[in-house]
Image: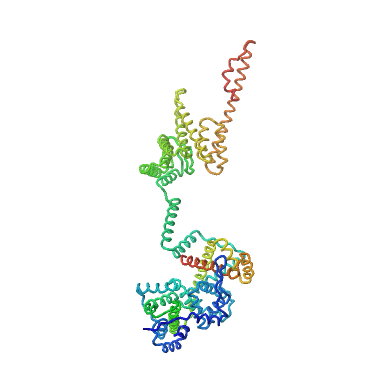
Amino acid sequence: MARKQTDSNSEPETLWRKLFGGRSQHAKQSDDGVREIAAEDRNAIRQYLLRRLSEDQEQIIEQRLLNEDDLFEELEIAEDELVDEYVDGRLSKSDGEQVKKSFLATPEGIKKQRFAKTLGRYQSDQKNGAIEPKKPSLLSRLQQSLARVSTATSPLAQAVVVLIVISVGFAVWRGFFYQSDVDQALVALNAAYRDQRSVEVRITGLDYAPFVTTRGPGTAKINENELQRAELKLLDALRKDPTPAAHHALGKVYLARNAYDDAIKELDEALKADPNNPEIFADLGAAYLEKGKIDLDNEKSLQEGLGSGKGVEELARSLDNLNKALTANPNLLEALFNRGLCHQYLGLTAQAKTDWLEYIKRDSLSPWADEARHHLRMVESQEKKLSKNKEQIFQEFLTAYNSQNRSCDSECAQPQAIPHFRPVLREL
Amino acid sequence: MLLALRFPFADISRRRQLAELTPDLSVCPIEALVSDIHPMKRERDPTPEEFEKLLAWLASAGRDYKTIHHRLTRIFTSRGCIDAEMLADEVMNRVAVRIDKVVTTYEGDPVKCLLGFAENVYHEDWRDRQKLSEAEPPTQSTPPDGGEKEERERKKREQEDECLAICMEELSKADGNLFRRYFQEEERAKIARKKLAAELKITANALRIKAHRIRRRLQQCMQACLAEA
């Protein structure tokens, strides 16, 4: 049987006392968890790294390095300090050579050296006032964080992180890149009316295009393919999932197609499921407005007195919906624009003027604002005409009144012409 | 035997003498010493059973395999070994394949036994490197590469600066502040460190340890960042 070997724990300690002036003191622990080692240990580690110790001393140090956490940490700190001194040129020539051919020759040492140099540049930037570090790009941060997670955490944590990344990625994709059928249809609708719009009203979410009135088969610059694509997409979307958004979008397509009854039907459906949506109210108001305009025109072309009043009724409905839209969202410019038009067609010039002024105040730069200014000028012109008419009426009233006075006897207390002018006079 | 234990990093001739003096000792660390008169030969991988026994042996003395392996690696690095991790593996393998013998014949701190193997592995590696450098032809001056090397170096530096900035931003405000104040240019650092230690009500050495812990975190962060870049 082989003889058992034993180590002699007392031997290194005796040697340590002899070499470093006493047994290494126990590390002192401060309040914040930092354990400090004795000064002689710090010195011993530095000497060890500079290869100034005898083999016996090295043996003792290495044995302790494997056993003592604090001393091992000191080894890492002392290495960093030596690297800094080497990089700054603060080591003696012999020590520098020693460091260079020992741990600075290893891949780990090379990394430490590069880090020390990078830190040196950072210090210089600080000294020169460029304290704020360069802002890294979002992509760099993400890459860096992922790299760290993939190298430093357990498989379970990595799986959790992967799940989170996938979820965030999905959310970002849904939020920024994913387009539902409804979104795609609205993009197509916008594309269809890029050069010209077919209705005077504003449809929510649609970009500006000039309104060109054509009677009969004109050469409208409308992309029929895109329009058809939008409609088919939405019909398909409604078949799969009849959401209020899909009804709303299809309502907009029909409105743009001048199919107002269909538009009103779809928008009413949308409102059933989403009864407080200001944009649906705005578009419903727009549909009634366009429909009302046509019916008013039709009624005018009929003989006086045969009109059903349908046009005015539709304009009134339009106004009601537009008011609801603006109550729900006073900043909804489409609704404000359409209400200006509605008031104008209803002959309510004062209210129309207020709406146009308000619109221009909120949106003074867009092409829609140019149209609003044009309408404002029209309203003001109407106002002047109306004012002139009122003056004429007043003059006629005075003439009638005076002539009646001249022909009337003294007992003639109530001029016969006055009741006829009474409503006009009230307005004056 | 005691001589062998106390002078594990002796030169080869001395080791040979020691080996000759102790021919009857065939286990840790003497067997390792005997083997270093031959070129380094990689040990076979231990079987799972051998490895389990190694873990149990270390655990019985309150030692953790991973910690010991990591520290052996760092010791090899401090001594300038290029492939320090491989050498630490080799030490563990050598002990593991002899574990039955070690367990029955060796009493004492496992760390000391491991160091015996480690010194042998170190010397074998050192000898191999010497042979390699002797065999290498003298380095010829490299032809100019039209500034490509400088350009690569410049880009690398930029990347390092950016990574350090990223990692600095990830530090807490207190840690970032402590790090910046501690690692200033040397002439300003001394005063700043004294002031900082007083502010934090800790000793200068406790501050040094704290600052270097932050530095280690930053360095790890930067390496991960550079690896990804």
Q: Is residue B121 left or right of residue B208?
A: left
Q: Is residue B119 left or right of residue A363?
A: left
Q: Is residue B93 visible?
A: yes
Q: Quadrant of residue A17?
A: bottom right
Q: Is A237 located above or below residue B104 in the figure?
A: above
Q: Is residue A99 visible?
A: no
Q: How many marks?
A: 0
Question: Which residue lies at the image location 44% right of the left edge and 71% below the top edge?
Answer: B64
Q: Position of residue A356 (x, y in %)?
A: 55, 37
Q: Is residue A163 left or right of residue B151?
A: left
Q: Position of residue B129 (x, y in %)?
A: 44, 81
Decide which of B165, A40 is in the foreground and name it. A40
Decide which of A212, B173 is in the foreground and name it. B173
State the colouring used for the structure image: rainbow
Q: Considering the image in quadrants, where does the N terminus of chain B appear?
A: bottom left
Q: Position of residue A339 (x, y in %)?
A: 51, 35
Q: Quadrant of residue B108?
A: bottom left
Q: Position of residue B15 (x, y in %)?
A: 44, 86
Decide which of B25, A382 is in the foreground and name it. B25
Q: Is A91 located above or below residue A124 in the figure?
A: below
Q: Is A45 located above or below residue A378 in the figure?
A: below
